[in-house]
Every structure is written in structure tokens, then in C-alpha cells.
Amino acid sequence: MEFVYKCSECGKEYPIEPDVMLCPVCREKQEQNRPLRGILEVEMQGAFSESSSIFDVLPIEKSYFPEIPVGNTPLWTPANLQKKLGLPNLLIKDDTRNPTGSYKDRASWLVAAFAKKWGIRNITVASTGNAASSMAGIGAAAGLNVTIFVPENVPKAKLIQSLQYGARVLLVKGNYDNAFRLSMQYNPPGKALNRNTGYNPLTIEGKKTAAFELCHQLKRTPDYIFVPTGDAVVLSGVLKGYKDLQKLEWIGKLPKIIAVQAEHSDALTRAFEKGDFEEPVAARTIADSISVDVPANGYYALRELQAAGGDCVRVSDEDILRAQRQLSSTAGLFVEPSSAASLAGLLKIKNQIPENATIVIMATGNGLKDIDSAGKGVKIPTKSIERLEDIDD
């Protein structure tokens, strides 16, 4: 089996090598304050059987992957939530079980393997927190040096996580877009690899693995998949995975993939409605992991979502906090706000979905990563008691 990079815009092919990130022809069309042009995707050339290992559909040999258990996350049945919502075929793909508590480990794992194969020791990444802590943790397992650029308001838990893993952490004034810009300018001594989502083609490819797992776990194609969406690389990974599954003829129809965005961080949704990206609007949302002004992978995600017959849904911060609380109190799964957006999106359009539809919500990040935001959705006790008689009714 062979793999090459293929430009998602012009179709030109390139070898999978460290110096190849974006199509050099299409990147010349890059405009300021717009998503990246010339996004490359991994093209598989050959045939696979359904019994193939996940490593057989990835462009790096198994021997280079660090020994840390990424992926193979549970697909489980939230019985109480099913009953409460009247959706008997609602399922959760639980990527909070990844080593660093995030879906982002899927991309970091493949990037680390690529670095090991090419003898690269230094990795750079910009992040709102999860990709940073993910690359730091997976990088630690792979023996890599990781430098991360994060906004100065990054949730403390994600900051501490990254530092515990031994990464070099650089706090950036402003938002994720500023962190992304500085990380792209950074050129450390020695050979280095940039892991930035969208820019590095392997971030999409690593994130497609969840689609392959769903195919094996369900033995059928779900009717709907709800994906929290910010820079649109998790979304792109799920779309790429199902496109590959269809290409391999392992599935027939595609699922209806729904991109869920916070209403004040909705660049992809606005482009979906208007047909193209316009001037960015400053993002404001409690869900830091999906807060972005300009989605780096926007053009690719928009095109693939349209081609797959997907859709977009906006949810408010209040919707997100309610969904977070509902997921915790009915299913026993505590996720961070960005992850809860997937359930919030389902609740927003629930009346448009057939009762017996098979629905998957993507749980992409553990709730302990941002307890300050989670605290806004609950009433925290302020009174201590000494006797049982002090308990208020």
C-alpha cells in the first residue's frame, strides 16, 4: 500500500516528507484573515480488507508509534440520557478516555510517529490548550521536545498538564489566532516539525481514526454524528475517515455529520450559510477549545461538509453549560464545555431527527480540563455545617 499527499484544491500530489505541509501552488492564493489554502490530505493507493489494522490505513509504519494507548475509545450507551431524550439509539464516542483526556491525542500520536521515522526531535504547536497538552503528553512518551504557544487565558488545568509533561510553554497575548501566527514564525535550532492543526496534514489523518473505530464498533453507518467544531480539524478528520471508508467500499451511505459551533465562534457556520468566508469576527465563548476567529482548516472542512451532505448548528454558551450538566447528571460523563457542544447541538435540532435514528455524539475532552467554566453551570455550596441540624431543606 502506498500513500501520498494530495492537494484538496488542485489535486497535485506530493511525497509525504517533513518539508511538505501545504500545496506550494495553492498556498500562493492565501489571503489575510482567511483559512489556509492548499490543505493537503493523505491519499491511499491500494486495497485493504475490513480486517486490516488501523495502522494499515495510516501513512506511518506501526513500529514508529510511541507505546501509549491512543484510540480504541469506547462507544457506549447512555441509558438514562436515551430515556430522557426519547432517543433509544443515542451513543457516545468517548474520547475523554485517551491518555491526555482529549480527541487531539489521535493527531499527536501520528505526528509523533512521523517525527520518529524522520529523526526529528523538536515539535512546535499552537493551541487553546488541548492540542498543546496532547502533543506534550504524547511527545513525552515518544521522547520528543515540545514547544507550545497558548493564549494567556488558557485554562489552568491544560497549562499545568502541559508543564507536567515537560513541554516548554509560551504564553501569548491575545487569542488562539495570535498563538498560531507566532508558532508559524518560530524556528528553533535544529530540525523541527510544526504540528499545527490543518497546516500539518497528519492532524486530519490522525483524527480520521475515530471514523474507522465507529465502523468496526457499530457494524453499520450511524444516521447522525454531532461534532464540536472550532478550527474544523476534528470535523475534517471525521469527514475524511468516512470518505476513506466509502472509497474502500466498507460502507455505502455516509452519515449526516453535524458541525456544532458556539454562536459567537461560528465562522464555519457563517461560511456554510453564505457560501464563503468573510472578514473574521472576534470569537467569544466559554468553550475555549472551539473558540477561533479564523478556522485554519475552514476551506477544506466547508467543501467536505457540503460534499458529504452535512450541516451546521449554532448553540449558545447557556446551551453548552446546560448540555454539560445534563450529560454529567444523566450519563455520568463529565466533559469540558467544547465537548458538551455536541449534545447541545443535538438538543437544538432534536425535533428534526427521527426517534429511532442512530446518533453518535463525539465527546472530545474531559471536564477536568476546565473546571472554572464548568463551575458556572452548577451551584457551588458556600456554607459549611457542623451538625446535621444545620442542613437547609
Image (tube, rainbow, N blue to C red):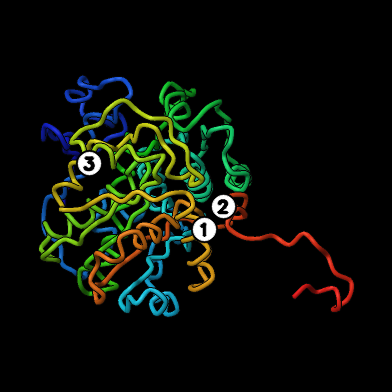
* Residue receiving disc 3: 272
**Secondary structure type for disc 1:** loop
Identify the mark nearer the N-term, 2 or 3: 3
Left or right, 44 with reference to 365: left
Q: Residues within 10 Å of mark 2 (few under 14, many from 20)?
A: many
* Residue receiving disc 2: 369
Distance (Cα) linking label 2 and label 1? 6 Å
Q: Which of the two residues, 224 or 122, is positioned nearer the viewer here?
A: 224
Residue at the image position 40 percent from the left and 39 percent from the top: 265
Q: What amino acid is found at the position of numbered circle 2 in the picture? A: Lys
Left or right, 266 with reference to 130: left
Tag 3–tag 1 contact (CB < 8 Å): no
Q: Position of residue 14 (x, y in %)?
A: 17, 34
Q: What amino acid is found at the position of numbered circle 3 in the picture? A: Phe
Identify the mark nearer the N-term, 3 or 1: 3
Q: Please name which of the two marks, 2 or 3, marks the residue nearer to the observer.
A: 3
Q: Which of the two residues, 90 or 117, is positioned nearer the viewer here?
A: 90
Tag 2–tag 1 contact (CB < 8 Å): yes
Residue 114 in sight from this viewpoint: yes
Residue at the image position 37 percent from the left and 48 percent from the top: 107
